[in-house]
Image: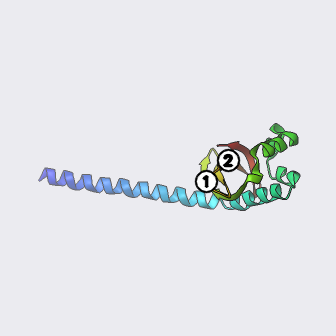
């Protein structure tokens, strides 16, 4: 009789733990989706500014912190070293939250899909808008 009760309580405890884990995961996913709103349009705007040759406009999509650490000339060097003209297709990955920042890996694919350039963008919310705080080759 005691073993039956113990197994019954163990099963209920396991189900409760799974329900709590599922609830936590669901709340985290919803929080991430809500907080990441506005990032994809910013990424599209950034690359469209670069494609049009409006480097200054793309540079202004970054945070003041980024502009303090990366001068305009270094920003231009970064863009030229990436050789973005070779890539046509843009695919963004799943955003990750880390210390109040959102990190998004963007993969640029060449037209022949033989070359992939992964870039990690770190975004910070400045007021109501998202801004790029870091750009790294992944």
> Foreground: 62 or 29?
62
* SS under mark 1: loop
Residue contact at pointers 1 and 2, CB within 8 angstroms: no
- SS for dot 2: strand
Residue located beneath label 2 in the image: 119
Q: Earlier in the sequence, mark 1 or mark 2?
A: 1
For label 2, count other residues whose C-alpha is less than 10 Å away and answer few (under 14), some (14-19) or many (20+).
some
Residue 13 against residue 65 in the figure, above or below: below
Q: CA distance from mark 1 to mark 2?
A: 13 Å
> Which part of the image, by quadrant, shows the C terminus?
top right
Instruction: Please name the residue that numbered disc 1 is placed on.
Output: 95
Q: Would you say residue 126 is visible in this rendering?
A: no
Viewer-nearest of discs 1 and 2: 2
- Rendering coords of residue 61 (x, y %): 81, 53
Q: Position of residue 8 (x, y in %)?
A: 22, 56
Q: Position of residue 4 (x, y in %)?
A: 15, 54
Q: Using the image, determine if residue 119 lies above or below residue 38.
A: above
State the residue in front, 46 or 66. Answer: 46
Q: Residue 104's spot in the image, x, y percent? A: 64, 51
Q: Which mark, by number, is residue 1?
A: none
| Residue at the extreme top of the image, as rendered | 69
Residue drawn at (67%, 47%) of the image:
119
Compare residues 76 and 14 and report the one nearer the observer. 76
- Which residue is depicted at the point 81% across and 54% down? 50
**Residue 87, image quadrant:** bottom right
Q: How many marks?
A: 2
């Amino acid at each position: 009789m005691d073993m039956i009760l113990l197994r019954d309580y163990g099963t209920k405890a396991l189900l409760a733990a799974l329900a709590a884990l599922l609830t936590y995961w669901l709340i985290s996913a919803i929080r991430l989706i809500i907080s990441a709103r506005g990032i994809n349009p910013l990424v599209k705007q950034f690359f469209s500014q670069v494609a049009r040759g409006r480097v200054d406009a793309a540079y202004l999509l970054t945070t003041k912190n980024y502009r303090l650490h990366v001068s305009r000339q270094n920003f231009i060097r970064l863009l030229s070293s990436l050789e973005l003209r070779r890539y046509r297709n843009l695919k963004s990955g799943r955003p990750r939250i880390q210390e109040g920042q959102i990190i998004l890996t963007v993969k640029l694919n060449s037209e022949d899909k033989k070359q992939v350039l992964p870039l990690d963008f770190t975004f910070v919310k400045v007021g109501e808008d998202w801004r790029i705080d870091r750009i790294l080759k992944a």
